[in-house]
Amino acid sequence: MIKVDQLKVTWKTRCFPVILASAALATNPGCDGGFGGGGGEGPGHRSQRLALTPEQELALGTKAYKEILSKSRVLPADRPEVVRVRRVGQRIVKATEIQPLLQEINLHIDPAYLRWEFNVLDNKQVNAFCLPGGKVAVFTGLLPIAEDDDELATVMSHEIGHALAHHSSERLARQQMTQRAIQAANGSLGGMDDRQRGNLFGILAAGAQLNSLKYDREQESEADHIGLFLMTFAGYKPDRAIAFWERMQQVAQGQGRPPEILSDHPSDAHRIAQLQKWLPQAKAAKAAYDRGAIAPPKR
C-alpha cells in the first residue's frame, strides 16, 4: 500500500506578483507548489513533504479542537476578550483571501477546508495556537501582554501562518505519524492512549502544551514571515510586531524562564533582525497593493 506521504502531488500555479521589484515578498524566484498529501514547494519555495490532504487536515483539526475546548474553560462569546479576538481574527481571515499575496508567498490553500473558529481559553499561560483547518485559541494570559490589536494580530497571524503553511502536516510526515493521523482524521481519537493523543496534539498545535514538540527554526521563520505580511495586509501596523517580540523577551527575562508561547516559538535577536528586514517589504507591498500597482500574471 502506498502511504500518503510517499506520493508526489504538485499544483502548478501562475506567478502573480502583488508588488513591483522594489518590494518583493518571496525570498526566492519560482512558482510551482505542492499541496496536501504529497510534496512540492512550500512557503519560501523550499521542498515540503506533507502527510495529509487539506480535507484530512480539517477533519483532524476539528476533532482535536473540539476535545481541547471540552477540557478547557472557554469564555462566553459576549465577553470583551472574545469579541476582541474574533474581531482581529476576521480581519486576518480577509487577508488570507487575497490571492496575489498568497501566490507570491507561495502558499497553497483551499478555502473549502478552512472553517475558521476563534475562542478564548481562561488560562494564565501566555499562549495561543491555530490547529489545521483554521481552529484558533488564544489564552487569557496572553491578552494583557498584547497591549493593542496590532500586537494581538502579531501573535494570531503568526499562529495562522503555521496552519496556512501546512506545518502540522509536514511535522506528522517527519515524525512518521502519517498513518496514525489519517486513521484519526477518518475515524476518531478514541482508539489512542493518552500518550499517543498527547503526541498527536503536540504536533498539531505546539501552543496547546500537550506534550508539544518544538517547531524547527525553518518553520518558525516561515510563520514569522507569513504572519508579518498577513497582519500588514489586514490593516494592522507591522512595526508593532517587533515591539511585541521585544516585550516577550523582557517577560522571559523577568520570569527567569520563557512564557509557554516562547518555549516552542523562540524569540531571539535573529527573529527580530529578520522582522526588521521584512518590515519595509511588507509596508511597500501593502502600499503597492492599495494603489493597484499589481503586475499582471505571467502566462
Image (tube, rainbow, N blue to C red):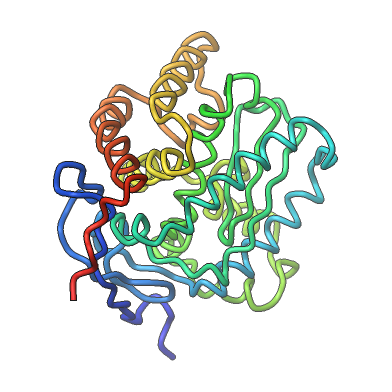
Lateral position of residue 189 relative to residue 58, left or right: right
Lateral position of residue 178 relative to residue 29, left or right: right
Looking at the picture, does residue 124 appear above or below residue 226? above
- Tell me where residue 129 sits by quadrant: top right
Lateral position of residue 127 relative to residue 40, left or right: right
Looking at the picture, does residue 176 appear above or below residue 163? below
| Quarter of the figure with the N terminus | bottom left
Looking at the picture, does residue 37 appear above or below residue 120? below
Residue 141 horizontal/vertical position (percent)? 67, 25
**Is residue 93 or residue 70 the one in the foreground?**
93
**Is residue 227 or residue 189 the one in the foreground?**
227
Q: Residue at x 63, y 45 (%)?
A: 210
- Residue sitting at the far bottom: 1
- Residue sitting at the far top: 254
Residue 241 horizontal/vertical position (percent)? 42, 27
Residue 2 horizontal/vertical position (percent)? 41, 87
- Tell me where residue 91 sits by quadrant: top right
Q: Residue at x 18, y 49 (%)?
A: 20
Residue 105 horizontal/vertical position (percent)? 31, 55
